[in-house]
Structures are given as structure tokens and as C-alpha cells.
């Protein structure tokens, strides 16, 4: 079994990953607040943890991994958007969740096993808050319930921040009902125009942090293996999750391994609407940048390093992927992942190293004549790339190579019988020495945008960019 090593934010070192239960490896990743389109920075953790999900499934088996990523569908940003637009909150969140999933599918992200919505776990949040109050870790005041930070001595260990840094980083609200400036809200009152639920402390709604603690406990238990997210969530969100979860359920350890991805820049600058370099994933897709290209650019930088999105990187990625897809046009499912590539990836998700290994393998294949490359080599190359979520054989990820026309992904099944016919024509021509039919068919294929390779091993037909399936009609 491949040994996975992960940099654990909690211990600040790389550790061998040892799951609590090899039969059920559990991972929780903080998802989006659903009030608007996902921007490019929102997509980075989705892609990073999608690769980890794929690796865990490869090592432990697809049926032995549980991946949870939530949707925050109760939040003041959503409330404000509803006021601005006059639309119903449920309508906004439902639409935004659909947008998010469509955009992430375009980047090749698999759906997690569970995608809970905060509003579906309000009773569990209330129960956890009651537990915290009963154990002396929270208190009610003026319709609010707050977590008593001083009641948890380990507060701050995850982020490694001093008290002064934490106060500054949390932008703490000074309020008369707080015992300490660092205490954070678990429950707050709602006015009649805001979403609210009945509770022992009056009609109100949850604070931001409690939702992830309640949902992870309900779906993964008091102890689970991995918690992930962007490093902007490390404090205060993840720090608060640890405190309230460990205090509510001291029998557990909450998350054992913490992974945080670094932030994203655009052309060397922080992404900002004021700088004109703020992009949503949808905008890039609409501009004709394929989701697979976006994914490749993301994975070309290690997740723990800042990533710089540039137009040049996108063009380079597009050229590389087109070249690689020329190899995998004839790939079959069931190939084996290269052991060296898997080992590289298992070293703290070293995606740049894995891509470098794919380049090496591709170079070796492309340096030889097609008839010198075995089908196993092609299948294994495809399987290795697919561990990274690249070169997947589906309409979402592959259509862009054929100018975005999804129906042309069926080219392989269209071309196979023509290839067999060409083989038969050539065999007959070898006997009659009349190659006119062979040449006519080859010319028609070239006109349709099909690359024709003929060798002693047989005939191989591959669609090229600009391939026109309509021109193949009547060739058989």
C-alpha cells in the first residue's frame, strides 16, 4: 500500500497519514457561502481536495472513503443579497449551489459523498450549543449564546497565534454582552425580516462556526481523519471549530490532520475587483478557457504555495493537454497508475512533481513511432493522468479539444468501423496492387480532420482539432 505523507497544520510538520479506520477514511472540507458565483480563489481548495479524495480512493478503495463538503446557506451575506435584489433567500441559495456544482464539474471535481446544507442541521447545532452551555463552555446573554474562549486553554494552538494576533485577525466585535472580547457567537437573535429558528434562547440563527462542527459530528463522528480548507479559514473559523467541537465532545479528537491551501494571485497581484483582475470560474469558462486547463494551472503549483494565475500559463497548459490527449485518444479504461507517479503525489500532494512525471512519460511515448507504443503504455498514461483528474474520458473534460463540441467525443466509436474498413481495403489492395480505394478513403478522412496512421501493426485514426464528423457520412 502506498504511504501517504501530509503536512499537518496542527503539528507544523509532514506526517505519515494513518487513518483511524482503514475501512472508512473520513475527510471534511469547508465549502462555499452560497450568495454569488465562485471566484477563481474559491475553486483552488475544491481542486486540491478533489486530488486528495482521488488519492485516498486509489489507496484505500473507493468504497472506503467518506468525503464531506458543506454549503453555508444561512449567512448575513446571503441576507444582504436578498435585500439588494428583492429575491427570496431560498431562491438565491438554490441557484448559487447549482452554479457552484456546474462550475466545479467543469474543473473535473468529483462530487463529495455528502454535501450538507447548514439549514438542514439547525437542530444539531442547537443541541451542540446546549451541550456547551451545560459543560460550562458557553453562556447566554441578551438573546445571544457565546463560546467562552478562556474555558478552552488550547485555544490558538492550531493557528499558532498570540492573543494580540488573534484579536486583530478575528476583527472582534466589542459588545456589552461579551465576557471577553475573544468570545465568539454560537447563536444570535433574528429580527422578523431575517431567517430564524425557534431555540431555548429565542428565535434566532446560528453563528458561522458552529455549523461545521455540528455537520462534521453528525456525518463523521467525534473523531475523523482530515479537515481541509483555505489558509484564510485557519483563524478564526477552524480555530473556533476545534474549540467548540473538543469541548462539546471531549471523548473525540475532532480532526487529526489539518490541511490548508495557500491563496491565489492573478498576474502577480492579489485578486481584486478594484484592480480589474477578479474572475469568477464561470467568466473564464465563458471566455473559452477550458475547465481542464484551469485545473492543470492550479495543479502546476504545490497547494501550500501561493499560486499565480496568468494567461501565459493557461496557454501553455492548453498546448500540453492537447498533446497529451493526442496520446490518449485510443486509451481504454482499466490502465494502471504508474507507481512512481503515485509515490510522488502521495508525498504531500506533490502535484507539480506528478505533472513533471507525466511530461516525462508523454515524452517517451511521443518520441517513438505509434506502432512502437503498446496499448498498455497508452492506457497506463491515461490512468496516471486521471489520478490528477486530467485527461478524463467524458464530455465535461474532453470536449474542448474538439472545439467544444461534445458530440465529437463519440469520434472514437465512429472511427473504429472506418478503421476496420480501411484495413480490409488495404489488405485487398496488397493483392491487387490497386490502392485507389485506399487513397480515396484516406483523402476523405483527412478532409474530415482525421489523422491517419498506417503501419504493419494496423491502422489508427485520430480526430484532430477541427474534426467534422458530418464529413464521414457515406464512407462505409
Image: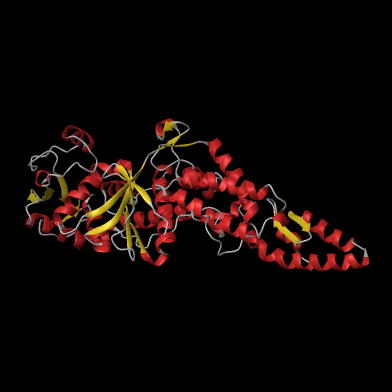
The answer to whether residue 90 shows anywhere in this view is yes
Q: Is residue 23 left or right of residue 248?
A: right
**Residue at the image point whose x is 44% and y is 45% from the top:** 350
Q: How is the image coloured?
A: secondary structure
- In the rendered image, the quadrant that contains the N terminus is bottom left
Residue 94, image x, y percentages: 36, 58
Q: Is residue 216 above or below residue 33?
A: below
The answer to whether residue 107 shows anywhere in this view is no
- In the rendered image, the quadrant that contains the C terminus is bottom right
**Residue at the image point whose x is 12% and y is 47% from the top:** 152
Q: Is residue 192 left or right of residue 332?
A: left
Residue 260, image x, y percentages: 33, 44
Q: Is residue 277 above or below residue 45?
A: above
In this rendered view, identify the residue nearer to me: 170 or 359: 359
In this rendered view, identify the residue nearer to me: 438 or 209: 438
Residue 72, image x, y percentages: 30, 53
Quarter of image, res 419: bottom right
Residue 266, image x, y percentages: 45, 35
**Residue at the image point whose x is 71% and y is 66% from the top:** 416
Amino acid at each position: 500500500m502506498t504511504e501517504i505523507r501530509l503536512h499537518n497544520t496542527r503539528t507544523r510538520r509532514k506526517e505519515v497519514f494513518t487513518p483511524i479506520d482503514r475501512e472508512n477514511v473520513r475527510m471534511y472540507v469547508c465549502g462555499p457561502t452560497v450568495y454569488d458565483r465562485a471566484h477563481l480563489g474559491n475553486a483552488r481548495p475544491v481542486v486540491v481536495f478533489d486530488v486528495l479524495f482521488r488519492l485516498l480512493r486509489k489507496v484505500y478503495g473507493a468504497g472506503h472513503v467518506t468525503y464531506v463538503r458543506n454549503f453555508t446557506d444561512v449567512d448575513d451575506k446571503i441576507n444582504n443579497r436578498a435585500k439588494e435584489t428583492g429575491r427570496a433567500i431560498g431562491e438565491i441559495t438554490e441557484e448559487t449551489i447549482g452554479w457552484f456544482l456546474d462550475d466545479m464539474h467543469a474543473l473535473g471535481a468529483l462530487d463529495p459523498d455528502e454535501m450538507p446544507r447548514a439549514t438542514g442541521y439547525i437542530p444539531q447545532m442547537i443541541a451542540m450549543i446546549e451541550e456547551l452551555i451545560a459543560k460550562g463552555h458557553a453562556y447566554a446573554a441578551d438573546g445571544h449564546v457565546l463560546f467562552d474562549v478562556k474555558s478552552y486553554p488550547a485555544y490558538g494552538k492550531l493557528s499558532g497565534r498570540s492573543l494580540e494576533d488573534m484579536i486583530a485577525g478575528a476583527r472582534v466585535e466589542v459588545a456589552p454582552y461579551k465576557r471577553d472580547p475573544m468570545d465568539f457567537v454560537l447563536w444570535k437573535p433574528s429580527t422578523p425580516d431575517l431567517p430564524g429558528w425557534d431555540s431555548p434562547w429565542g428565535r434566532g440563527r446560528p453563528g458561522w462556526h458552529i455549523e461545521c462542527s455540528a455537520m462534521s459530528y453528525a456525518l463523521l463522528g467525534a473523531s475523523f481523519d482530515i479537515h481541509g480548507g483555505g489558509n484564510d479559514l485557519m483563524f478564526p473559523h477552524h480555530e473556533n471549530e476545534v474549540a467548540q467541537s473538543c469541548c462539546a465532545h471531549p471523548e473525540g479528537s475532532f480532526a487529526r490532520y489539518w490541511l490548508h491551501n495557500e491563496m491565489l494571485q492573478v498576474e502577480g497581484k492579489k485578486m481584486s475587483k478594484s484592480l480589474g483582475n477578479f474572475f469568477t470560474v464561470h467568466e473564464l469558462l465563458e471566455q473559452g478557457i477550458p475547465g481542464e486547463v484551469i485545473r492543470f494551472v492550479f495543479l502546476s503549483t504545490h497547494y501550500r504555495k501561493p499560486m499565480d494565475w496568468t494567461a501565459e500559463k493557461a496557454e501553455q497548459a492548453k498546448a500540453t493537454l492537447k498533446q497529451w490527449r493526442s496520446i490518449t485518444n485510443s486509451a481504454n479504461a482499466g490502465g494502471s497508475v504508474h507507481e512512481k507517479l503515485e509515490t510522488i503525489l502521495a508525498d504531500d500532494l506533490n502535484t507539480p512533481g506528478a505533472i513533471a512525471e507525466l511530461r516525462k512519460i508523454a515524452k517517451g511515448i511521443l518520441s517513438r513511432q505509434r506502432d512502437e507504443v503498446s496499448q498498455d503504455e497508452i492506457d497506463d498514461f491515461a490512468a496516471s493522468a486521471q489520478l490528477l483528474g486530467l485527461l478524463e474520458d467524458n464530455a465535461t473534460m474532453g470536449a474542448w479539444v474538439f472545439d467544444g463540441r461534445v458530440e465529437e467525443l463519440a469520434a472514437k466509436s465512429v472511427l473504429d468501423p472506418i478503421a476496420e474498413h480501411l484495413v480490409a481495403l488495404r489488405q485487398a489492395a496488397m493483392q491487387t496492387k490497386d490502392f485507389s480505394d485506399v487513397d480515396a478513403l484516406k483523402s476523405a478522412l483527412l478532409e474530415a480532420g482525421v489523422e491517419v496512421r498506417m503501419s504493419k501493426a494496423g491502422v489508427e485514426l485520430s480526430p484532430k482539432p477541427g474534426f467534422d464528423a458530418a464529413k464521414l457520412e457515406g464512407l462505409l
